[in-house]
Image (spheres, rainbow, N blue to C red):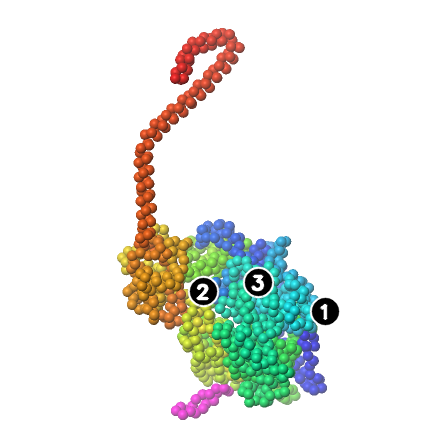
Amino acid sequence: MCDSAMFPAGLAWPKVRVLQVLWALLAVLLASRRLWALKDFQECTWHVVLNEFHVVGEDGVEDRFFEQEPMDTVGKVFQTLVDSPVDPNEEYLGFPYYLKINYLCDQKLSQDLVRMGHLTGLKPLVLVTFQSPVNFYRWKIEQLQIQMEAAPFRSKEECIAEEVCSMSWYTPMPIKNGSVVMHVDISSNGLGTFIQDKGFHVNINGFLKRDHDDSIVYTVGEELYNLSPEHFVGISSRPLWYTVDQAPVLILGGIPNEKYVLMTDTSFKDHSLVELSIDSCWVGSVYCPHSGFTATIYDTIATESTLFIRQNQLVYYFTGTYTTLHESNRGSGDWVRVLASECIKKLCPAHFHANGSEYVMALTGLEREFHLLCPDGQVGPFEMLPRPRLLSPFSLSVYTCNIIWSEYIAGEHTLLLLVETGYGGSSKLYQVVNYNRVTDEMDVVYKVPEFVPEARGLEFLMILGTETYTNTPMVPKGISFNPYNNLIFIWGNFLLQSSDKENFIYLADFPKEQTIKYIARSFLGNMAIVTETEEIWYLVEGTYRVYQLFPSRGWDVHISLQLMQQSSLYASNETMVTLFYEDNKLYQLVYLMYKHEGWLVKRPMPVEKLLMYQQYTNHYDLERKGNYSTLSFTNFCPFSVMRLRNLPRPQRYTRQERYRARPPSILERSGFHTKNSLAIYQGLVYYLLWLHSKYDKPYADPVHDPTWRWWRNNKQDKDYFFFLASNWRSAGGVYIDMDSYEKIYNLEPEYELPERIFLDKGTEYSFTIFLSAQGRSFRAQAELGSAFQLQTQVDVGVVLANPGCIEALVKQEVLINRNSVLFLITLKDKKLCYDQGISGHHLMKTSMMVNVVGSSGLCFQETHLEPHMQGNLMVPVLIGCPPGKRLAFDITYTLEYSRRQNKHYFDCVHVDPEMPCFLFRDIFYPFFLIQDLVTGDSGSFQGSYVLLVVGGGPTLESIRDYSNDEIYRFNSPQDKTNSLIWTTRTTRTTKDSAYHIMSYESPGIDLAARPSWPPSVGSPSGPPILSTSRRGVDTSTYCNYQLTFLVHIHGLPLSSKRALFIFMVSTSVFVGLVIFYIIFCLLWPLMVKGCTMLRWKINDIIASDSYYYCASISGISSMSSLRHSRQGSIVSSRVEEDGAEPREAMEEQLMT
């Protein structure tokens, strides 16, 4: 789409000369209005990049997010924090990255403005939201957020100033197991420069690795750095397919004759052009029809950890390295080819995951499709659907049968197939076929009309079969389904809408001369349409008016304003690459050309502005007043003000768990942090999230808060730590405030409906809509039995996607003195459409849409930044057991009650506070708590439940799960094999009398009912595994509240075999000790005599050696004396002669 497409020619001057003058006047008026807003609010926006720890403080450095393992870079710093509220025995780790935060004004970074913001008290507040994982069998489903305050840090560059030249703010970038998609929201603390809140996608890119030269490269191919115009200019746009809210990396193909794709982990805030490392040769089947070879990557689909592509008729996939998801390296080494023997003509995405898996569909050139299951990043085998036996009778009635599109409805386990059939040379017919994977049944749910209906000026037309038709054939191209509002669209050169798959409405505003190429849905009530000629249309789901956004008069006005402001997001020559929704806002990825240079930009599609400009240009009045004319615009909105009031606190319904963390206070007069203080901040945030994950356990703490264990031993020293900090004596130069690391349970509403609502059984959600009417909208109408009744032209309609499951009550109150109306809306679950389930598992998707009658596309709220559409609200509703609810074993009260009832308590020798011991012969009184991890509520569980021993073993290492037969024999009162482990005086049982039904008032469990337990259950200190379940015995909630926990029981009676074994071992040891003692007593005298003789012999040997040594020394001394003095020699000789006899006698004595 080039210059001529994006900027169509205006109206001819001779026809409507005054219109162009009015358009220019409108542009000037709107531009001056915009400039007036900029005078009060400077265009400043947050700027965020990632930095590793070793580059903190360096300018111009931006790291890529692919490292996922915790770093041991903060432990040494924590060892220096003596007299601080940290446990020196704990291991403190850190995350690989920091968030570096600045703000840009007029798209430029000004350190003067940043310093001014810092000096006036500005502090960025960072809210990181972790997306729940797909595989809820491996990871816990939770809605987790952490709010952090950024710490100011001086840059490392040389500065001649006394304090600071350049600075930034830093916070840790946390990582959570099971989550690879993070959304970062930056806001201000309300001081200093006004900066609008801004959100960023900061996702883990598992398709990057560190090369041998320490450079970061892609694993899927080679990254290119030259965006050539021939790859984008004149090329039609293509759809962006991915699993909604779950894909961390997006991929987009469609570059002609090249194996190039665009990849991004920031939702195209940044992007990379990558040449994929796949074979370029044609290796398809000889049976596949093809007209020629091309290297173009046609279809691309991104899931949570895997990328899928189609080149010609070949399908490949590549799995990224995500250790936070799989706890091991499951990344692909190369692209893997699948369905090698099939001719694949199209890949179809499944936009939503279900049952812990993601899905991809591949359509062949024949009358079948292949359904791919992707559980936990492992690409499973393709399943051919529908079954050949089901297609055979369907194909016999026609000559040709071809599947054009497939849409998977995960909640119903069904496939919607758009099937093309034909009878020889006759015209083709199109049908919508529903295939159920569970029942393996297939039926035709709708037959698409052969020709486009004649609407005759209507906005929509109900297809009943009695309407007249044009000569234009209906040519469908695809199907789209929204699981929240159950709206199905069949699109082609027409647009059909249905909410029940059977009754369709023809939307006549879309021209039959155009053909839809693809659609982009927010799945929150908005939908954009792209045609083959690159036209863009817009529709509010549930309404019937389709608006043309481009080309349009509103687009012309918008372009004029952007050129006046010299916006960098627009150019005279541009090509749209794709159109997609992000956070319910429509965005374009556009390739801009200016002076032979091109670049890609992501820009918002200003839907509200275009509709508002189009309304102004189409509906205006020129009134003559004296010598001049006044220009006025007609406002078709039925209300002037719309506000939401009386919103309840959101956490109970949104299930958002939020933590707060502030940086440690730095004991430096400038207030700037150091690398050590940032490392401490990193370690504290890591430990806070680690406490959160550790809190997911079956045993309840005495205090229901994950941070209780962190500070419980230091709370009494809080004043002492503050005293040290007040006197600048804290170790490490930082002060850690224990109140700065906490869990928040009382968030206030933000005067807007939440992103989603979770409803338990019978739960209600209510709010109020305040509408100020335009002009005089009230009248009095007399009614029988009353003087008069106020009537208003402002009405509100509530549309429920599943009225059999939820209901809405609307109560109207007229405030005639304020010319306003209040509508109290209450949404309530009807307790009909859900059984019982695990917390956060298998939730039913539905929605509530609130529409002010006559407001679609006509009502806008003006703000200093941009207008917002009003009058249409949609809230996704999830029915089932909400995330964050759990059943926990109340150890504290169980021990207290057991001690009081049994009059004593004996713990194990080795005390374990996490698993206290219970004596076998005592009555066991288990108590449980219902805890809400989101709101902080915790109360005694007083419902009914079934308690079973489901496993056990002599030791912790040998614990095993029992089979179903063993569970029945060990727990059922109906067991006839004398294997029952425990009994109770409770007489209430399940319907089949298989198990006892326990409750809060149960008299307890007698574990000593059986003389001995089987060895597999436990030993005298063995832990059996107990399990509780509410399914089928307590239907007051949708939560099953399953709980499996260990109980350490000591004093178990021994079985006969084990007792005999212990007796034999003990007897053998005792007899052995007695025999050893007897042998020792008998041999002791001989051993003493032998030792004495040995000692004398050793002494004799030592004495002999000493004598010979002394004799040798004496001889040498005598010879020396003889040489020097004869007299000395004579004396010596006499002495020797006199001593010869005694010496000889001594030698004879020694010899004997």
Q: Which residue is mark 2?
A: 744
Q: Which residue is mark 3?
A: 319
Separation of marks 2 and 3 at Cα, in angstroms: 37 Å
Q: Does 89 sit above or below residue 654? A: above
Residue 213 appears in the figure: yes
Q: Quarter of the image containing the C terminus?
A: top left
The vertical placement of 936 against 823, above or below, is above
| Number of residues whose C-alpha sits closer than 10 Å to that of mark 3, classed few (under 14), some (14–19) or many (20 or more) | many
The quadrant of the picture occupied by the N terminus is bottom right
Taking the image as shown, residue 762 lies to the left or right of residue 20, namely left
Q: Secondary structure at mark 2?
A: strand
Residue type indicated by callout 3: Thr
- Residue 87 highlighted magenta (yes or no): no
Reading the image, the residue beneath label 1 is 595
Q: Residue at x 57, y 78 (%)?
A: 395
Tell me the magenta residue range: 776-793
Task: Kindly identify the amino acid type of the residue bearing the numbered disc 2.
Answer: Ile
Closer to us: 835 or 484: 835
Q: Earlier in the sequence, mark 2 or mark 1?
A: 1
Image vertical order of residue 38 relative to residue 1130, above or below: below
Q: Residue at x 33, y 52 (%)?
A: 1057
